[in-house]
Amino acid sequence: MRPYRELWAWLGRLLLTLFAFLAAIAIAYFVKEPRYSLFGNPWMPVAGVCFVAAFTCFFAAARNWPLPPWVRPGFPDIKVEISGTGTTDTEREASTGLDAPAHLRSFNARFTSTETGQDASLTVLLYVRLTPGSWGRAGEALCPPPGWALPPSLSLSPMSMPFALSPGEAISGQLVYEVPRYYLDKIANPLDARLEIADQLSGRTVNIPAAIGHYDRAVMTPAAGGAELLGPEDAEEAVHRDAGQAQP
């Protein structure tokens, strides 16, 4: 059992014992006094409240709620190791039935939970920075996991998402993403990319660089989620700069 589950279960047992004690008092009065109402006396309603509260505590233990339940847990304490990266050009079947070129980026990654009492359900997305002004106010492009079957010849086996990570557990695999064709000529040079890690259980999201390295909770930066948008002044500056470069 996790620490929260143990505490919820202890509260549930305490309230269940209190329910039995109060119900016994109510039944004793009911048996002793002929005109004593079993459900109309003050003992039985309180016993009923204790029973409902005990059921809620056991349910909270099963769902591993935080305590107090209105406090949101932080992002789980995990470590991420990226040991390799790669790019692959291949083809996939388009909606027209014809083969279309596809550009893939992959990462060999290992996720390790150093938590003692918090599970994680993680989704990892890739964002690449765009040349300012090349796609309106969009500063980044989302590169989703491929929604199509990868050819076996690529030797790529993407991790399914979200993936569960229990305390003390480690998971290794490949993160594979498709860079949309309409972004390929708009990606900033040199490449600047990040991996956005979202935990479905805590509702927290963090960023790490999409590069080889070791990353722990101390270097992960909080993220609002989604692609970055340029401010109006940044987009306007980029348009003026491109117009100046276009002049002879």
Image (tube, rainbow, N blue to C red):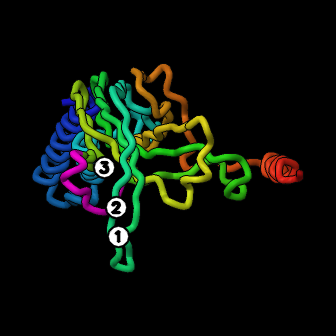
Above or below 168: residue 47 = below
Q: Position of residue 177 (x, y in %)?
A: 39, 49
Front residue (pair 207, 108): 108
Q: Position of residue 183 (x, y in %)?
A: 56, 56
- Can you identify the residue that label 2 sits on? 91
- Residue at image x 27%, y 44%? 163
Label 1–label 2 contact, CB within 8 A: yes
Position of 225 with respect to 32 (left or right) is: right
Element class at badge 3: loop
The label nearer to you, 3 versus 2, is 2
Labels 1 and 2: the sequence-earlier one:
2
Count neighbours of disc 2 (C-alpha within 10 A) and say few if under 14, some if 14 to 19, many if 20 or more: some
Element class at badge 2: strand
- Residue at image x 42%, y 53%? 103
Count neighbours of disc 1 (C-alpha within 10 A) and say few if under 14, some if 14 to 19, many if 20 or more: few
Measured Cα–Cα span from mark 1 to mark 2: 6 Å
Labels 1 and 3: the sequence-earlier one:
1
Question: What amino acid type should be assigned to the residue bearing mark 1?
Answer: Asp
Q: Quadrant of residue 197?
A: top left
Instruction: Say which quadrant the N terminus sits in.
Output: top left
Q: Position of residue 110 (x, y in %)?
A: 29, 30
Question: What amino acid type should be assigned to the residue bearing mark 3?
Answer: Met
User: Would you say residue 99 is visible in this rendering?
Assistant: yes
- Can you identify the residue that label 1 sits on? 99
Q: Which mark is residue 161?
A: 3
User: Would you say residue 50 is visible in this rendering?
Assistant: no
Measured Cα–Cα span from mark 3 to mark 2: 23 Å
